[in-house]
Image (cartoon, rainbow, N blue to C red):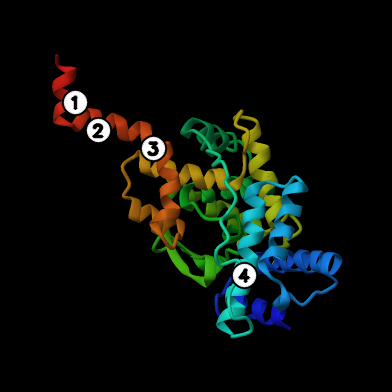
């Protein structure tokens, strides 16, 4: 009952996405299974920190990454915070738990040349799948939207008159993103071919059978096209979103504006993209700072 109440709380009050709620559910289910096996109980209200710590140790021994372990622990911590707020437990047993140390992986964005090469390769293609895939690439790079946000786009979200698109982000928060003319052009071309396949008109992006596209398909599209032009290890929709933010910052965009475009709730989330712009910042700094200019003139 406690778990079900918690999941309802995440859905109705926190307005988390179904994908996020499923992740919480799976983490709690996995922990309950551990408790049943090790302590012959699946009542999570009765669990103490030493038992939680043994679970964490078992996760470490299983070989999964510290990042994954910290995410699972975060799910349990949120669950016990909920139990404390609803007075089902007196204290959160994970309140003083310190996250495992992790090494931050630097995600390298695509270059402008790589992205342009992919987009230019579509110029001679006129079939439905190619036009749709071009639109997927252009939407990611010109708006910086998340994969799930792209999948859920509706035709009504596009405003051709205002040249904007409405995006439903995390916690059902809406934001309006401008559309550049090349994307408008591809959108109109796509809608013409979309009418020929028979489909659910409310959904913007569909499969060649007229069904709503799905996240795995979107990943395959991006990975396939960028594997042809880039040697980077990771070639995913998120890297295109990453590229969108990095290239805007490289061109002098305001950090707060990029934050709003990405749909971040705080600047801390947006600042992870600034390290890729450090070279640009150093160049501007060296050109602008009086002492730097004086030194270079010696």
Q: Which residue lies at the image location 18% right of the left edge and 32% below the top edge?
A: 289
Between marks 3 and 1, how big is the CA–CA gap?
A: 19 Å
Above or below, 156 against 218 in this view is: below
**Disc 4 designates what residue?**
93
Q: Nearer the viewer, mark 4 or mark 3?
A: 4
Q: Is residue 126 visible?
A: no
Mark closest to the chain's N terminus, 2 or 3: 3
Between marks 2 and 3, how big is the CA–CA gap?
A: 12 Å
Q: Is residue 39 left or right of residue 271?
A: right
**Disc 3 designates what residue?**
277
Above or below, 88 against 217 in this view is: below
Residues at circles 4 and 2 in contact by the CB criterion of under 8 Å: no
* Dot label at residue 285: 2
**Disc 1 designates what residue?**
292
Please provide percent x and percent y for residue 135: 57, 49
Q: Secondary structure at mark 3?
A: helix
Q: Which residue lies at the image location 59% right of the left edge and 81% below the top edge?
A: 90
Please provide percent x and percent y for residue 68: 66, 52
- The quadrant of the rendering that contains the N terminus is bottom right
Q: Nearer the viewer, mark 4 or mark 2?
A: 4
Above or below, 77 against 5 in this view is: above
Between marks 4 and 1, how big is the CA–CA gap?
A: 53 Å
Residues at circles 3 and 1 in contact by the CB criterion of under 8 Å: no
Mark closest to the chain's N terminus, 2 or 1: 2
Between marks 2 and 1, how big is the CA–CA gap?
A: 8 Å
Q: Is residue 68 left or right of residue 187?
A: right
Mark 4 Cα within 10 Å, few/some/many (few <14, many 20+)? many
Residues at circles 4 and 1 in contact by the CB criterion of under 8 Å: no
């Amino acid at each position: 009952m406690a778990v079900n109440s918690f999941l309802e709380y995440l859905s109705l009050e926190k307005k988390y996405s179904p994908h996020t709620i499923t992740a919480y559910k799976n983490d709690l289910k996995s922990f309950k299974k551990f408790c049943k096996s090790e302590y012959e109980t699946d009542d999570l209200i009765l669990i103490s920190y030493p038992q939680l710590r043994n679970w964490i140790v078992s996760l470490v021994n299983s070989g999964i990454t510290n990042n994954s372990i910290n995410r699972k622990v975060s799910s349990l911590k949120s669950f016990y915070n909920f139990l404390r707020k609803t007075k089902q437990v007196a204290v959160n047993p994970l309140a003083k738990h310190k996250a495992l140390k992790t090494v931050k992986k630097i995600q390298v964005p695509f270059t402008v040349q790589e992205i342009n090469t992919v987009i230019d390769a579509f110029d001679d293609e006129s079939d439905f799948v190619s036009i749709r895939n071009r639109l997927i690439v252009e939407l990611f790079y010109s708006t910086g939207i998340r994969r799930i946000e792209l999948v859920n786009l509706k035709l009504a979200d596009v405003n051709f008159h205002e040249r904007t698109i409405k995006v439903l982000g995390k916690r059902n928060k809406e934001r309006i993103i401008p559309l550049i003319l090349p994307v408008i052009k591809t959108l109109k071309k796509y809608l013409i071919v979309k009418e020929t396949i028979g489909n659910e008109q409310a959904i913007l992006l569909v499969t060649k059978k007229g069904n709503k596209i799905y996240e795995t398909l979107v990943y395959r599209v991006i990975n396939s096209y960028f594997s042809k032009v880039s040697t980077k290890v990771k070639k995913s929709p998120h890297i295109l979103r990453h590229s969108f933010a990095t290239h805007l910052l490289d061109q002098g965009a305001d950090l707060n504006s990029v934050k709003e475009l990405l749909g971040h709730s705080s600047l801390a989330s947006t600042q992870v993209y600034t390290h890729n712009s450090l070279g640009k910042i150093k160049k501007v700094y060296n050109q602008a700072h009086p002492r730097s200019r004086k030194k270079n003139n010696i």
